[in-house]
Image: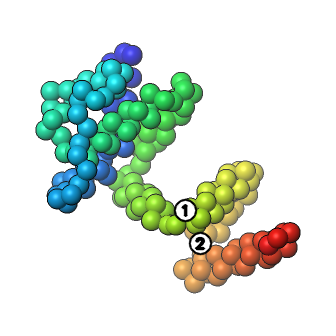
Amino acid sequence: MNSKWQSLVLALLLAAAAPAFAQAQQGAPPNAPAGVGWSSLSPEQQKLLSRFEGQWSGLPPARQRALARGSGRWLGMSSEQRELARQRFQKWRALPPDQRRVLRERWEKFKSLPPDEQAVVRQNFRKFQQLPPERRKALRERWGNATPAERKQMLQHIRERQLQRAQRRPGG
């Protein structure tokens, strides 16, 4: 892997590890899980993370775990998946810091949802992605121009429709 791609991979891994690093800076609880030993990484992970080898033992355990997890995920991706990840990361880097902050907050909120609610959000997202681009644009504009009260009403309407559909299904 040439140095340009290694740098990009490293940047992706650092971005993935940023939340864990920020958490570690706040102080880990006394019963926090241990870090990952350099020798426990696969040779491929060590190569990918070679930039950290000299300082690995000094990294916070949460960051070691995040980098190990991220490198494992990266190595498990196909070349197409890696290319998509690179593109997403470039889009992420191009966002203004305040927009990245909002997206991180939304991600944390999503992760705090119960699994069944996460599944509903994912299902709705997939449905939205399948809409024609002009319909998605119109829905975004409608949502963006709505007041908080109108947004609440729209969400309530959607929930009611989903409930009605579920009740019409056999066994629902």
Q: Which residue is mark 1?
A: 115
* Number of residues whose C-alpha sits closer than 10 Å to that of mark 2, classed few (under 14), some (14–19) or many (20 or more): few
Q: Is 139 located above or below residue 8 in the figure?
A: below
Residue 54: x and y in percent read: 15, 27
Of the pair 46 and 154, the residue shown nearer to us = 46
With 101 as the anchor, is 142 left or right in this view? right
133 vs 2, left or right, is right
Give percent across and percent down for residue 110: 49, 62
Q: Secondary structure at mark 1?
A: helix
Q: Where on the picture, by quarter, is residue 161?
A: bottom right
Give the number of the disc on residue 145: 2
Is residue 20 in view? Answer: yes
Tell me the mark number nearer the camera, choosing from 1 and 2. Answer: 1
Q: Secondary structure at mark 2?
A: helix
Disc 2 residue type (three-letter) = Asn
Callouts 1 and 2 close, C-beta under 8 Å: no
